Image (spheres, rainbow, N blue to C red):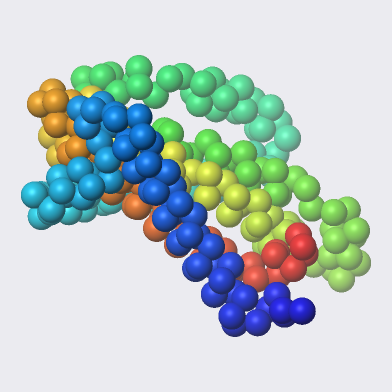
Amino acid sequence: MTDIGSPGTRVWNNAALPAIGVIVAIALWWLACLVFHIDPFYVPSPADVVRAFLETPQYLLDESWVTIQRVLIGFAIAVTAGLVIAVTLAASRTVERMAMPVLAAVNAIPKVALAPLLLVWMGFGDSPKIVMVILVSFFPVIVSTMAGLTSTPADLRELARSLKASWWQTFVKVRLTWALPQVFVGLKVATPLAIIGAVIGEVVNPDQGLGSVIADSGQNSDTPLAFAALVLLAVIGVVLFYLVAGVERLLVPWARSISS
């Protein structure tokens, strides 16, 4: 029997299986294009997408970097604000009951409808795109962090109290530590949402970024170039997701053993 903790098994699970999944997905995409004779105007094949990327690689990479910057700035602000708000709400039941309906209402507003208003309020440039990233991605951080902070077992609190721990010590060493796995669940949910928020802002105001590439490609009927931008967005999303997952493994290595 193969040891599930052996290096070979870890390489198979963490690298080989995801790579096989990507290869299978690309093969099925290519096969569908060949079997159903799909016009590249509607759905280009992987070869068409690669060809579109190779025609303007520097242009696409430059636009990718613009989108990445907006995503990272907005995501960092959303995480910081979400954690502060969640800690505040978890510390006071009164504040939570007052604020949660407002937060839920703000989250329920279609963000696409807000994008033109952000242009009116903030003008053109990076600011409305970054704000869109924040609006789309901060709510999962709040909800997951609150869920973690409010789910601390009572026996752990009693243990901290019996050791004469202060409120701050109990919060940091017990409640926050217990909540970290839930916090990272919210971060991993918010990561792709941050990319979606940036693309929404870039499509509404197509100045720079991969969203503007998609908008301009649609106007020029250049579907392969639009798909090349979509593939780059997917790659960015996967990389950021696994970066967050890697940080989770470093900070809370015990979470996986508890869940398993």
Residue at position x 23%, y 47% from top? 47
Front-lying residue, 181 or 149: 181
Kindly give the residue lying farthest to the front in the view shown. Answer: 35
Q: In which quarter of the image is the N terminus?
A: bottom right
Vertical comparison of 31 with 9: above or below: above
Q: Which residue is drawn at 49% across and 68% down?
A: 15
Q: The C terminus lies in which quarter of the figure?
A: bottom right
Residue at 50% from the left image edge and 67% from the top image edge: 16
Residue 92 appears in the figure: yes
Report the residue at 48% width, 60% height from top. Answer: 20
Indicate the position of residue 230 as horizontal and vertical percent values: 29, 41
Q: Position of residue 233 (x, y in %)?
A: 31, 45
Residue 70 shows up from this direction: no
Of residue 161 and residue 33, the one placed in the foreground of this image is: 33
Is 164 situated above or below 66?
below
Q: Observer-nearest residue: 45 or 191?
A: 45
Where residue 18 appears, as percent x and y from the top left, is 50, 60
Answer above or below: position of 137 versus 246.
above
Q: Using the rendered view, name the quadrant where residue 111 is placed.
A: top left
Name above or below for residue 219 compared with residue 140. above
Residue closest to the far bottom = 7
Q: Specify whether 106 is left or right of 219.
A: right
Left or right of 112: which side holds 9?
right
Marks counted in the figure total 0
In screen coordinates, is 93 left or right of 55? right
Observer-nearest residue: 9 or 257? 9
